[in-house]
Image: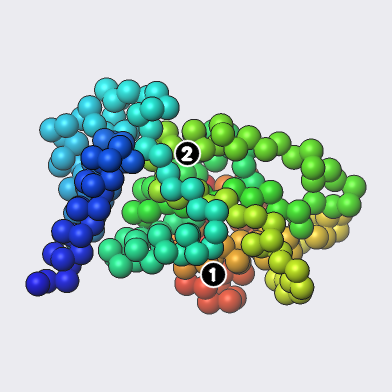
Amino acid sequence: MNPNLSGTIRFQFEIVRDFVCGKTPARRLVHEVGAHMAALMGSPSFNEFFFEFHPQLNPRSACSKTSNQDAITPLIARTTRTLQRSLDDYRDRKATIAPVPTMGALHDGHMSLVRLAKRRARRVIVSIFVNPTQFAPTEDYGAYPRTWKADVARLAAEAVDIVWKSRHQDEYPDGFATRIVPEGPATAGLEDRFRPHVFSGVATIVGKLFVRCRPDVAVFGEKDFRQLHVVARMARDLNLGVRVIGS
């Protein structure tokens, strides 16, 4: 049997089984089957064709409901193994991948980045990790807002595929001793003098995300202009194979 066809049958059986057992919402069923068929057919137009005739099932349609119950629940990955197994599955289906790194407390600016990522890639991963290495000793890491439930609800409404919720021990285990320290014009400005730890903290945590995800593109806000340039320079210098996009 054609391996692509075999994979399609296996995937459809699993997703329909979960739907029948009540584990998969109807909108998720349509979204997953549509995305898989589009990847198999080599065109993203499958969803557009389907939703033209069934707009009430389209999570982005104006005529679809917007309650939390109707939102497409993303996979919550809390371990590297869970994240990488899902990403391997996406790659097997030839899906492009885009991460959107965040520290949570999501706002409209973050949602704009998520929507751009969805236009640029088939699968979108949003990471939520309050990175302690970006805080100076005089800054209150503990006071940074944690709004996990609200963040997940917003991401579900945008049909994000995965929320990567790593733990401190995943990012900085005992004995962690390697950091990325950017230099050169990309770091020049006020922050490199008054908050010199910031760019190293950003580059290290984003570099770890890129290594885990092996993404095609990554989206960052142009509001943090220096951060955008530091990450783009790092991706080029280390040959990470990801196109960094600003918005």
Looking at the image, tell me whether mark 2 or mark 1 is earlier in sequence order: 2
Q: Residue furthest front?
A: 21
Q: What secondary structure is marked by label 1?
A: helix
Q: Nearer the viewer, residue 224 or 50?
A: 50
The structure residue drawn at horizontal position 42% and vertical position 27%, both measured from the top left corner, is 68
Q: Where is residue 143 shown, x and y percent of the image?
A: 79, 38
Whether residue 91 is visible: yes
| In this view, 190 is above or below 170 | above
Report whether 127 appears left or right of 181: left
Can you tell which mark lies on residue 211?
A: 1
Q: Residues within 10 Å of mark 1 (few under 14, many from 20)?
A: few
The N terminus sits in image quarter:
bottom left
Q: Nearer the viewer, residue 79 or 190?
A: 79
The structure residue drawn at horizontal position 25% and vertical position 53%, both measured from the top left corner, is 14
Q: What secondary structure is marked by label 2?
A: helix
Report whether 18 appears left or right of 186: left
Whether residue 181 is visible: no
Q: Where is residue 35 shown, x and y percent of the image?
A: 26, 51
| In this view, 163 is above or below 185 | above
Can you tell which mark lies on residue 177?
A: none
- Which residue in the protein does label 2 denote? 155
Residue contact at pointers 2 and 1, CB within 8 angstroms:
no
Disc 2 marks which amino acid?
Answer: Leu
